[in-house]
Each structure stands twice: as C-alpha cells, then as structure tokens.
Image (cartoon, rainbow, N blue to C red):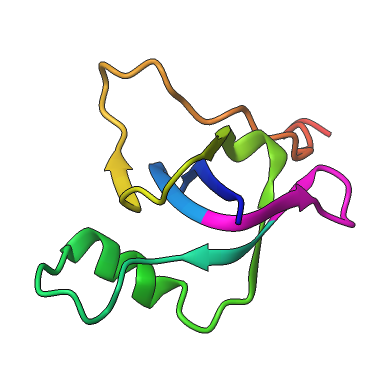
Amino acid sequence: MNIFRISFINQGKVYQLHAESVHQADMYGFVTISGLIFGETTSLVVDPAEEKLQSEFSGVKQVTIPMHSIIRIDEVEKRGQNKILELDANTNVSAFPSGLYTPDKNS
C-alpha cells in the first residue's frame, strides 16, 4: 500500500495529513486526496492534535484541495503523525496569492 504525506495551507495553518491516494482532480487546478489514514483509536496514548483532525475529517471520503495551497506531497514508507502547525512570522512558508478577480473600486 502506498502512503502519501500531504502538507497544505488551510485558513492560515499548515495541515499535514497521510492518505492512500493522491491524484489530479477532475476540476482544473485541484488535487484530490482519498483514503485518509489516522492512528489507531484503541491505542492508549491519545494525541489531541490528531483527534482534532480526525473529528474534522470524520465521514469524509475524499478531500479536494486547490493546487496552490499544497506545499508538498511525499510518498513515505510508513504513516507518521497527522498534525496542524501554526504559521508564525519567522517562517518562510506563506499562502500563494489568490487568483480571484476583484474589481477596482473606481470601476
């Protein structure tokens, strides 16, 4: 089984998820992630960050993310920790400027 680690920006935070499948979406400029992998629910050690992600994506079959939000996609040997990272002022990662058209106020 292939395992992918996907890092992307969502609402000013970096999300890092693990999934079984990553491919180009039918919608131009989007990537589809399916088969999200979370830790064992029977384990004794509970990670609150992963619990938050698991509850946020519970019942989701696939996630479609804009291509410009993705930082990187890695194929890994085994599943790591899913997490949400805060972006601070000292980081060199920032959101790509939005391509949405906003009319000039003088128009």
Question: Main SS of the magenta segment?
Answer: strand
- Please report the residue visible at 36 percent of the width from the left and 77 percent of the height from the top: 55
Q: Is residue 62 above or below residue 105?
A: below
Q: Quadrant of the N terminus?
A: bottom right
Q: Is residue 95 above or below residue 14?
A: above
- Please report the residue visible at 30 percent of the width from the left and 73 percent of the height from the top: 40
- Please report the residue visible at 27 percent of the width from the left and 79 percent of the height from the top: 41
- Please report the residue visible at 56 percent of the width from the left and 46 percent of the height from the top: 4
| Front residue of this view, candidates 84 and 87 | 84
Q: Is residue 22 magenta?
A: yes
Which quarter of the figure has residue 89?
top left
| Front residue of this view, candidates 72 and 96 | 72
Which quarter of the figure has residue 71?
top right
Q: Is residue 66 left or right of residue 71?
A: right
Q: Is residue 25 magenta?
A: yes
Q: Quadrant of the C terminus?
A: top right
The spot of residue 38 in percent (x, y) is: 39, 66
Q: Is residue 10 left or right of residue 89?
A: right
What is the magenta range?
A: 19-32
Q: Is residue 10 above or below residue 103?
A: below
The spot of residue 48 in percent (x, y) is: 17, 65
